[in-house]
Image: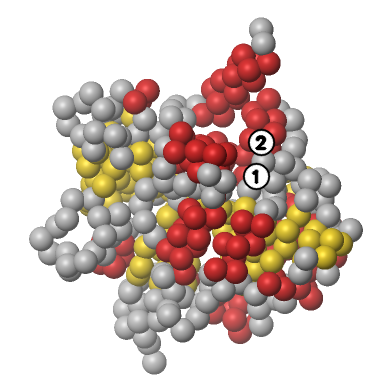
Amino acid sequence: MNTVGRIGSYIGRGVRSVSGTLNPFGGAVDIIVVKQPDGSLKSSPWYVRFGKFQEVLKAKEKVVNVSVNGVEAGFCMNLDNRGQAYFLRELDMVDGDSLTTRTSEQLAALNLKEGKNVVVFTCAKRQVDACIYLWRWDTNIVVSDVDGTITRSDVLGQFMPLVGVDWSQSGVAHLFSAIKENGYQLLFQSARAISQAYLTRQFLFNLMQDGKGLPEGPVLTSPDGLFRSLFREVVTRSPHEFKITCLQDVKALFPSDRNPFYAGFGNRDTDKLSYLKVGIPEGKIFTIDPKGQILMNHHIDTKSYTYIHGCVDDMFPPLSSREQEDFNSWNYWKLPSPIRD
């Protein structure tokens, strides 16, 4: 068997071992919902796709049922001929609402809980899933690329975990966990295709380093199919085009007078370009190479994730006790209502 064939065999075995009942040729991107100061809710786009191998495109009824935390959502999506799910425009929706999002009232009816919520999309007895993360308007976000940043390289970082080989950057789990413990939210971003969203989440949140795993957080992949995503990544070498748009969508969920992005981790100049574009200060952009050396402000430093972990309170100061208390007061924020006295 030639090299390509062996890689294909390994990938096939890896996909089968982690996918379970979820077919990897479909996928859904995680969703972020932000509670506004006035109690209303805003949502990032709902990107859902069913693949042709899931045999749903031949179904007569192309309705996608939605459930959140095991409860029916009260609305559904429809499926186009490409397998992409979308919302029909409803008569009571305000003009200009996107067909990829929900209204504040519809989001409130989901009764989302703090942090992670599981959303399942079902069509013709096939399903894909994702997570909805409920955050509040004053959240501070640390963004991380995946391939080459959490993994040690772009390409092998995708293949090696499928065959049980750890290919992660040393110390990343401990550092990111410490950042989360200081009150920041982690957002993981990848130019991988939507069909790889499930496997990407599986890799990230099954990663263990000396007993410490990565903190949970939304995983935002490209909403495009595999070939278009590969073309952008490999041929045009412009993954930043997707990443900038994606981060701008997230930024738009927050009040216009504040930037939620505190810092960013990446491994390419295009990652840095994306972070600068959405207002992350250059001094809070960390670029790591395959050897684990960190580049800041164009200077290579032999410091690593492990070193930064040792001084995490200086680089990522803990939220004040009042801020932390407010951040955890989710009973107050659970239901939408005007600002309380």
Residue lying furthest right in this view? Answer: 302
Residue 147's disc is 1
Side (left or right) of 155 relative to 93: right
Quick check: 203 above or below 104? above
Query: Residue drawn 66% across and 78% down?
Result: 319
The quarter in which the C terminus is drawn is: bottom left
Q: Position of residue 309 (x, y in %)?
A: 81, 62
Query: Circle 1 — which element?
Result: loop
Residues at discs 1 and 2 in contact (Cβ within 8 Å) = yes
User: Residue 338: x, y in percent?
Assistant: 32, 83
Give the residue at x 40% y 33%: 26
Q: Which mark is residue 138?
A: none
Q: Relative to residue 17, is residue 122 drawn left or right?
A: left
Q: Can you identify the residue that label 2 sits on?
A: 155
Disc 1/disc 2 C-alpha distance (Å) = 7 Å
Q: Nearer the viewer, residue 278 or 329?
A: 278
Q: Residue at x 66, y 57 (%)?
A: 269
What is the three-letter code of the residue carrying label 1? Asp
**Given the current orientation, which residue lies at the most extreme left position?**
91
**Disc 2 packing (10 Å; few <14; some 14–19; many ≥20):** few
**Residue 333 falls left or right of residue 67:** right
In the rendered structure, the answer to whether residue 309 lies left or right of residue 7 reads: right
Q: Quadrant of residue 123?
A: top left
Label whose residue precedes the other's in the sequence (1 or 2): 1
Looking at the image, which residue sits at the far front? 236
Residue 3 placement (x, y as % from top left): 68, 16
